[in-house]
Image (cartoon, rainbow, N blue to C red):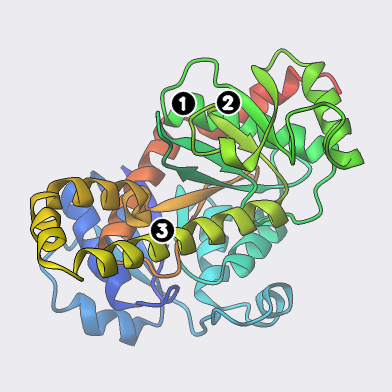
Amino acid sequence: MIKIALDAMGGDRAPRAIIEGAVWAVQEYDCRIVLVGKERNIKKFLNKSDYPKDKIIIKHATEAIKMGEPAAATVRRKKNSSISVGIELLKKKEVDVFISAGNTGAVVCAGILKLRTLPGVERAGIGIVFPGLKQSYIMIDAGANIDAKPLHLLQYGVMGSCYCEYMLGRRNPSIGLLNIGQEESKGTGIIKEARELFEKTKLNFIGNVEARDVYSGKVDVVVCDGFIGNVVLKVSESLAEAASSFLKQELTKRLLPKIGAILSLPAYRAIRKKVDSSETGGAPLLGVDGRVIIAHGSSNAKAIKNAVGSAIGYVKHKLNRHIIEELKKINV
């Protein structure tokens, strides 16, 4: 049975939403969950829940890392934080996956420091699955490494392609390099060099893609450095919220739009589901020698339950093994 360590103290709605998500997950999936955090706080909510008692256990951690704390310094200082303890459980192979909705920088830092990277990987990257007009796609990196070199971008392409193939079920996924234009002459020296590296491989690399192309479904994997990726992520989240607010304002101004809005409710709900981060649950930290999933800071119980589902797929598809095998084929 797959065993998952879950950071009970991480996230804006912790520990309640994390614990509710854990209870939901063990009722739906064949797994065991280790809730990592302050035992007293966890028991306060867990004791109110009905769940298979053999499927959830508590691992006490005396400290918690807050969202605004500096990542590297805090990970080193708070050695008994829920993030550090959870990653340590993963390192010792006492669990198969670690999930946290807490401080992203701290999760990345702890994962890299304690687990190191897979053979052939120089920098880990966060992979985010986005909805597209045709189908979903994965963007990597979304914030783990803001100063990527050409080789790192190539490795992101390999890792994103593996994720797309084995987790999303796409054969021979297409890969695009995020740039300010499709032409070979466009972009920084790093982007140009990365493009040359991609073109020397047998990957399904289609060249540069612009920001306007990412939601079109033109490619399965969008590759970029963590600085650009995080900006894309935050702007996308903000735009989705703003568009929803604009639409609501216009539809409630007059009677006829109100009637139309009521009739269109099923369509609105379907769209909302597509852009809802709780549907995907979390983003994998690809490239570390272990399985780490980073959930959104505002994760609710549904998001945590779905993150557990993603974690189970991560284990069953042996994703890290496939990444290692594919990197060996890249001769750079």
Q: Quadrant of residue 213?
A: top right
In this orientation, which residue lies closer to the viewer: 261 or 143? 261
| Quadrant of image for the C terminus | top right
Up the image or down, 267 lies above or below 202; here it is below
Up the image or down, 133 lies above or below 329; here it is below
Dot 3 corresponds to which residue?
240
- Neighbour tally class for label 3: few under 14, some 14-19, many 20 plus, Cα within 10 Å: some
Q: Which secondary structure lies at badge 2? A: helix
Can residue 187 be seen here? yes
| Quadrant of image for the N terminus | top left
Up the image or down, 10 lies above or below 148; here it is below
**Distance between the Cα atoms at labels 2 and 3?**
34 Å
Q: Quadrant of residue 203?
A: top right
Q: Earlier in the sequence, mark 1 or mark 3?
A: 1
In this orientation, which residue lies closer to the viewer: 275 or 247? 247
Dot 2 corresponds to which residue?
322
Dot 1 corresponds to which residue?
166
Identify the residue at horizontal 58%, vertical 69% (top origin): 84
Asked whether, in this view, residue 246 is left or right of residue 190, the answer is left
Residue 240, percent from left and from top: 41, 58
Residue 312, percent from left and from top: 36, 42
Contact, mark 1 vs mark 2 (Cβ under 8 Å): yes
Q: Quadrant of residue 48?
A: bottom left
Q: Earlier in the sequence, mark 1 or mark 2?
A: 1
